[in-house]
Image (cartoon, coloured by chain):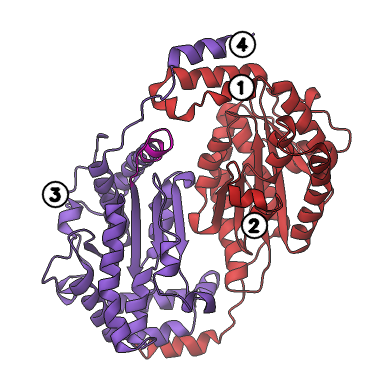
Chain colours: A red, B purple
Amino acid sequence: MIAKSQVKWTEDALTALRAPAGFRLADLDPDATPGYAGDKKDGAVDLASGLTQLAEYQERLYAESHGGDGRDSVLLVLQAMDSAGKGGIVRHVVGGVDPQGIELVAFKAPSPEELEHDFLWRIEQRVPRPGFIGVFDRSHYEDVLIGRVRALAPADEIERRYDAINAFEKRLVEQGTRIVKVMLHISYDEQGERLMERLERPDKHWKYNPGDVDERAQWPAYQEAYQTVFDRTSTPEAPWYVVPANRKWYARLAVQELLLETLEQIDPQWPAADFDVEAEKARLRATMR
Amino acid sequence: MIAKSQVKWTEDALTALRAPAGFRLADLDPDATPGYAGDKKDGAVDLASGLTQLAEYQERLYAESHGGDGRDSVLLVLQAMDSAGKGGIVRHVVGGVDPQGIELVAFKAPSPEELEHDFLWRIEQRVPRPGFIGVFDRSHYEDVLIGRVRALAPADEIERRYDAINAFEKRLVEQGTRIVKVMLHISYDEQGERLMERLERPDKHWKYNPGDVDERAQWPAYQEAYQTVFDRTSTPEAPWYVVPANRKWYARLAVQELLLETLEQIDPQWPAADFDVEAEKARLRATMR
């Protein structure tokens, strides 16, 4: 276990942010900071110290399966309404880790080829290998979110998918992947302000799409679709964590803490040498001038 | 163009480090710091300020092709003898950039399926998309390096590959990819010390492989194979840059500078909005409470 210096967490994030049976999205304040007693300034300090810990955990996780026979991996699934801050999580939390240990996938609208297969076909291909931290920026959950709101598939097909997701994730967990499913939860008003900022800044125009306002018009339907996701897929093997995200500093710190606590549970160790260290030293020494 | 604050570079790295016709690897001192007048302390300052510039260039490069019709990409090819510091470049230079803009591939020994195809088959599949900075940790050059030293293919096949590489890279360049080919150049003695350090530290054992000493025994043959690579594939379209790497701080700074100067040449711009900004503001405002 790597020493942790965070002092402002009053409760494990894995506990404070978990969506248990009966969880109601509508009851969670997007401005809240569950489990954390500090303010924005404390958060910056804890985020920086957390990066160092995360980097060491990642290296150990990688080492465990590359120099040893470890089979552990982590999969961070990020879902959110547009502008909720997925990109900031990737940049400021995932970006602090050695890129050699990260497998990041941004899932877009499926291609014609992908649409010919089951919705989990393209997902399966991108699950992290042992030793890696996989990050899904959007995921198979789009197929029961936009898929449901926009009726992109028949109702009975959407219905089928919840159990298919649970079976799929259960298999991943059995194979050694810890799945950390995160929904970043912002308010309707906050989204309006963030989209307006994109329109007001010429260097942000490229991030804006007129379709964003069309999606925003479906806000209640999306909240309902998320509620159904939590009701149906927040399983003991792979629970959902709902992170209030109106405060960007908190959302980043919370996702980092979820990853740290998950890695702490894995507690990866430097693997023992599978060769005779002294004999190798002698061989190497013989090559030195 | 983004303002650059580096003051200790006395010459463009793209000029100082380029392997031109007649370049002799044996004549380049691995302890040298070509083009840079500062010391290790200056290097740390310049590396930190360079990270900020690189992050902005990367975002613009990405934006140019995701909000506009830009086709530019960058491909950093990293080659080196074992322990020369490729991993450190990825961690400390590439790692400072938003992971969403990076496509990193670590090429290992080819799989049986890959071996059934031409050696460039697996490479072609991993070239960066427009807007991305691709990083190859090892590359198609292994097929004329270990391929040559270990005679993994007949001599006439190895011979064929140099021209095939040049044609392949020319095509990439024509399609908008700037290729930055970097060889990290360490000395034989330095490699010995670095391998010994891996043997002396239990947390580094996983990075050591007894095969490393076998490869080290082929040092002169590898230096000769690299020389042939420079002679045959340092083309005007895609020249080689040879970075003295006994000083890790210099190697990292130099690779960062090569990337910065390459992006400066591209000079990516924020794309103009392809929608009516005022009309969208009005649409969005209508959704706000």
Q: List the single residue furthest toward the left.
A: B22
Dot placed on the residue nearer the N-terminal end, 2 or 1: 2
Q: Which mark is residue A214?
A: 1
The CA span between labels 2 and 3 is 46 Å
Chain on which label 4 sits: B
Element under label 2? Answer: loop
Instruction: Describe the element under mark 1 as helix, strand or loop.
Output: helix
Q: Nearer the viewer, residue B178 or B2?
A: B178
The residue that disc 2 covers is A127
Amino acid at circle 1: Asp
Magenta stretch: give its range.
B61-72
Residue drawn at x 32%, y 61% is B248
Q: Residue B10: which numbered mark, if any? A: 3
What residue type is disc 3 on? Thr
* Alpha-carbon span between mark 4 and mark 2: 39 Å
Which of pointers 4 and 3 lies earlier in the amino acid sequence?
3
Q: How far apart in space, not on screen, are marks 1 and 3 (Cα)?
A: 53 Å
Position of residue B280 measured from the top left corner of the image (x, y, whole percent): 50, 15
The local crowd at label 2, few if under 14, some if 14 to 19, many if 20 or more residues have their Cα within 10 Å, is many
> In what quadrant of the picture does the C terminus of chain B appear?
top right
Instruction: Using the image, tell me which numbered label, if any, was put on residue B128.
Output: none
